[in-house]
Structures are given as C-alpha cells and as structure tokens.
Image (cartoon, rainbow, N blue to C red):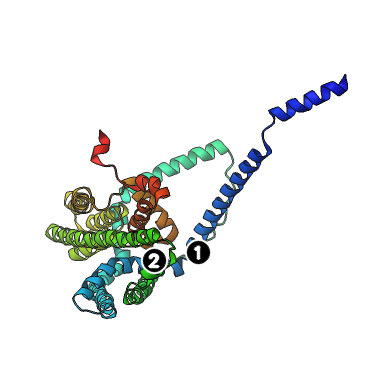
C-alpha cells in the first residue's frame, strides 16, 4: 500500500512545484536590483565627496557646449577655432573681473555695515522678539510645574564658529576658484574644436549609431546654448529694471541690488525669494515708514514674478519644455550635493538629460516625464 501511495505523492509534489529556473531568475533579478541600488549609492557618494574635482569639469563642459556654436560661426568667417576660443574666454573673464571690481566698493561697504544693520534690525524687531520670548518663558514655566523639581543646571559648551559673513566670503572664494578652473578647462576644450565629437562618433560601431551620437551632441549644444544665452539676456534686463525701480524708491546701492538680482535669478525659484528677503531687510532698517519700506521688496518680487511667469516662459518655454516639479527637484538635489554652484547648473544639466532621453528609445518615457505639459494634453 505504501509503495503505491508514495509515487503518487511525489508526482503531485512535482506537478504543483514551481520550476527551478523561475526561482533562479527571480533571485537574479533581485541581485541585479540590489547591485543597481548599491551602484547608485556609491555614485552619489563619489559625486558628493569629489565636488572639488568634478565641479570645475562639469562647469567647463557646460561652458564649452554654450560657446561651441559661437566658435563654429566665427570659424565660418575665417577666425581659427583656437583664436576664437581665447577671445571668448578672455573676454568673459575680463568682463566678469571688471564687473566684480566695480561692485567691490559698494559691496564691501554693505559688508562692513552688516553688524550695524543687524543691530538696527534687532532693535526694530524688539516688540516681536519680546512677544516670542514671553511665550517661550510661559511654556518653560508650565513645563517646570509639570516636571516638579527643576533639573540640575547643565553646562553649555560654546563652539567658536565663523559668522555668516565669513562663511559667505569663504563660499564665494571657493566658487571663484572653481569658476576660474572651469574657464581654463573650457578654453582648452573649445580650442580643440570638434576633437571630442569626432572621438565620440568614432567610438560607435554602426553608421546609424554615429548619426544618432552626432544628433544628440548637436541638439545638446543648441538647447543649452539657446537657454543660457536667453536667460543671460533676460536676467540682465531684470537686473536693470530692479535697479531702476529701487533707485526711484530711494534704496541705497540700488544698482548693486540690480546686479545681485541678475546673479540670483540664475538660481530658479530660490533666487527670487533670497533677493526679496535681503532687499526687504535692508529697506526695513533704512526707511522710517513701514509702508515706504514695503515698496522695495514688493517691487523686487513683482518684477521677478513678471519675469518668471510671463517673460521667460514666452521667450524660452518653447525651446525648453521642462515641468516645474522636475526643475525644483533638480535644483534642491544639486544644492544638497554641490551648494549654490550646483543649483546654478541644475537646469542646464536637466536640459542635457532630457535631450539624451529624447534621442534614446528606451529612455523616452523618462524624458516625457521631465517635459512640460503641452496645451493639447488638457483635452
């Protein structure tokens, strides 16, 4: 009896069991996902800790992509590529140096007045701070009554940290050195002409892949060059408008704030907020009347809102189809990784990723996720 039942049991177990290959494939997929996750974690760590090396390289590549169409245009009229590269980089460097030198005097005055401005701001905010302190003291008394005996006093250890002004100056010095290194690298990249493009095309085996690589590189150059050129012109106009408006309001160093608006507006979303807060703080300690003081931040915020909601989308939106959520996430990510300079290169980097995704079959779903919603999609 048992000899007959045992084979039946074994046959039923065999028929109901899953094939061994299916379990192996599932384990392989799990291992693959784990390896991809580990790789991404290690990649993020490498990007974070290699900031001083990678940041100038990435900036130089973006600068090269922006200026490559200009060097090719100059080459068509007979200017050699190395000569045009030197002229462009030296021109940008000299122009930036002159601008920084012209603003150094007023900016140093503002920095030297920072402690006094801080004290005046604290004195004007005294009623507010006293109310907050009263609420905190009441909460402390309630907590002491609830706890019964007061806890033993603890000794506080004061750590000597650099002030915010010194931290900002250190950050500017580090950013300046990265920008100088990036410009030197970009000079050599531009002077090499299409050397890197030829190497990329030669590395692809098939003619179809060569055409696709050429199209992707040229599309990246075109998109990034158009975006940065348009944004630079728009920001210059915005800085001039803000400087003029603050001048008529009576703000000190009005055109310094215009120059600051030009630089801050390269930082999407956050630049407008930072500029409005800084202008509002200075106006609050400068003018006696609160209504007069409110004019400066209102003018700053209104002009940046007009630029961000109407002017830039009209001039750049058709060429740069990116949705707001992807841009904001990218900006926050690069601020976390590389600070302010990372945020400044966030949108060009996102343009680069979207162009690559749009030209590779398997990545087009991710590229469509980054893109903005088209008017026809509402229907």
Q: Compared to 310, does 160 lie above or below?
A: below
Please state the horizontal and vertical placement of residue 343, each as a whole percent of the image.
36, 58
Residue of label 2: 201
Location of residue 365 by image quarter = top left
Q: Residue at 58% of width from left, 52% of height from top?
A: 35
Which residue is nearer to you in this view: 172 or 296? 172
Q: Is mark 2 on a helix, strand or loop?
A: helix
Decide if residue 225 is in sight here.
Answer: yes
Q: Residue 49 carries which label?
A: 1
Instruction: Of the two numbered discs 1 and 2 on the same chain, state the one appearing first in sequence.
Output: 1
Image position of 315 (left or right of 321): left
Q: Quadrant of the N terminus?
A: top right
Q: What element carries label 1?
A: helix
Q: In front of the other: label 1 or label 2?
A: 2
Which residue is nearer to you in this view: 331 or 120? 331
Please state the horizontal and vertical placement of residue 370, each as a whole percent of the image.
35, 47
């Amino acid at each position: 009896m048992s000899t007959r039942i045992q084979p039946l049991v074994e046959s039923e177990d065999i028929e109901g069991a899953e094939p061994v290959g299916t379990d192996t494939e599932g384990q392989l997929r799990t291992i693959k996902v784990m390896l991809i996750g580990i790789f991404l974690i290690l990649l993020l760590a490498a990007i974070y800790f290699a900031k001083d090396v990678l940041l100038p390289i990435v900036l130089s590549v973006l600068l090269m992509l922006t200026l490559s169409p200009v060097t090719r245009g100059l080459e068509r009229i007979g200017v050699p590529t190395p000569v045009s590269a030197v002229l462009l980089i030296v021109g940008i460097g000299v122009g930036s140096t002159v601008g920084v030198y012209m603003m150094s005097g007023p900016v140093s005055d503002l920095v030297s007045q920072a402690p006094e401005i801080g004290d005046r701001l604290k004195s004007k905010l005294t009623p507010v701070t006293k109310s907050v302190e009263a609420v905190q003291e009441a909460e402390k008394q309630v907590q002491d009554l609830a706890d019964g005996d007061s806890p033993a006093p603890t000794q506080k250890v004061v750590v000597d940290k650099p002030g915010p002004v010194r931290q900002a100056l250190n950050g500017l010095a580090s950013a300046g050195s990265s920008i100088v290194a990036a410009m030197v690298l970009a000079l050599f990249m531009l002077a090499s002409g299409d050397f890197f493009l030829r190497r990329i095309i030669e590395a692809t085996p098939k003619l179809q892949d060569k055409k696709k690589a050429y199209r992707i590189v040229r599309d990246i150059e075109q998109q990034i060059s158009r975006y940065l050129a348009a944004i630079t012109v728009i920001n210059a106009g915005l800085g001039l408008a803000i400087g003029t408006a603050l001048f008529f309001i009576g703000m000190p160093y009005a055109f310094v704030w215009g120059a600051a608006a030009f630089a801050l507006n390269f930082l999407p979303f956050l630049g407008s907020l930072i500029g409005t807060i800084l202008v509002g703080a200075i106006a609050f300690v400068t003018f006696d009347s609160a209504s007069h003081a409110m004019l400066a931040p209102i003018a700053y915020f209104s002009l940046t809102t007009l630029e961000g909601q109407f002017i830039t989308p009209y001039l750049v939106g058709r060429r740069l189809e990116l949705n707001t959520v992807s841009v904001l996430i990218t900006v926050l990510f690069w601020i976390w990784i590389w600070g302010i300079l990372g945020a400044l290169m966030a949108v060009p980097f996102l343009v680069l990723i979207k162009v690559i995704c749009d030209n590779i079959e398997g990545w087009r779903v991710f590229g469509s996720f980054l893109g903005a919603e088209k008017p026809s999609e509402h229907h």
